[in-house]
Amino acid sequence: MHLDVMSGADEAAKELNALLNGLIILNSNSGEPWICEAFHSALNTMSRKMGLRKFVDCLHKRWLTDTCVVLPAVHLCNTLSMRRTGFTTLLHAIMVNDYRNGHELRKISRTIFANSARFMIDYFRSNYHAVLPGSENAKRSRKDIPIASANVSASSMTSSSPQANTVQSLKYRFPLVTSENGEEYEMNPLIEELIDPIFHYLSLLIDGTASRPEFVLFHHALSTLGYIFQGLNPQRMHQLSLQLRQSIVDNAKQPLDRAILLESIELMINKWKDNEQDEDVRHFYAKFKTQYDSCASWHNIG
């Protein structure tokens, strides 16, 4: 009986891996039809053979160890969050636990650490603008937000160890989501609680020990989330920009590393509007684009 159970679990894990491998191949064509079909298959596999916790544990191991799985796993989790009660809370606990153990993960493997950061960053990016069902009751205006709530200590970005602190449910300046018709709603509190960990991840990605894959991930995060985080906490973004400048001076040893970080500074200067860069500036970075794209593709970032 025990052997039958173990065999069934192993078979289910193999099916999940096969699904994820398919998602990796299809990731460049992430249209709604194939996503729904793939997710449907995952749900059937999970409910028949694995159970929610087992499924999430297997998925978690894959996105930590295989960079190519991170983005498909985010898509999968987004759909499961809508279909399975309790999934979002479970996923949130896993992301927070990885964050708290970030220093240990980084010692074990820079790839595992970067993948844990990448998953949280991309999950936040894909869920930040989502309006929760029934959130009409949470509608509010900006004038209702106390000015004091904007005062967030920048020093927490460089705290010595994330696992020494619980994740802070910080009240940011404008923790609001704008719907398609322009109405504003309070942010999903589980998404809001990822803001502080992501700020800390960004700091670690350009610290004195950071490597090129971490620089590339930092550039990816800043180019996709920078404008959001600038609005949430300008003071903390200013502190991050100072750290970025220091990292260019102290840590970027190769021309490509410096180009990646310098372009991140350019994004800040241009208020995240890369299409407003001067032509000669764009030409300057174009010299490094082939190398940068190759590095980003190698690490499945972009």
Image (cartoon, grey):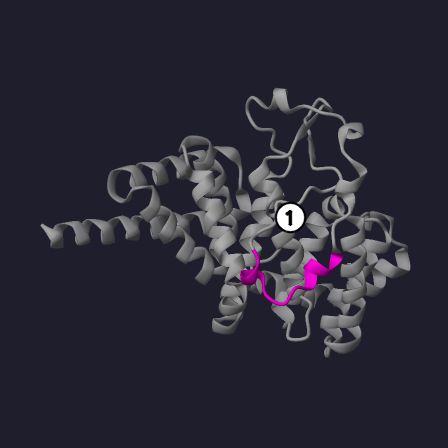
- Give how far across and how far down residue 177 sits, in percent: 68, 32
* Residue farthest toward the left in the current orientation of the protein: 1
Depth check, front residue: 264 or 256: 264
- Give how far across and how far down residue 97 sits, in percent: 48, 55
Q: Amino acid at mark 1?
A: Ile
Q: Looking at the picture, does residue 6 appear above or below residue 289?
A: above
**Label 1 belongs to which residue?**
195
Dividing the picture into quadrants, the one containing residue 145 is: top right
- Give how far across and how far down residue 139 sits, in percent: 67, 23
Quarter of the picture containing the C terminus is: bottom right
In this view of the protein, can residue 26 be seen by the observer? no
The residue positioned 38% from the left and 35% from the top of the image is 40
Mark 1: give few (<14), some (14-19) or many (20+) Cα within 10 Å.
many
Which residues, given as a range, are shown in magenta? Answer: 154-165
The residue positioned 59% from the left and 37% from the top of the image is 189
Q: Looking at the picture, does residue 37 appear above or below residue 29?
A: above
Looking at the image, how many numbered discs can be counted on the residues? Answer: 1
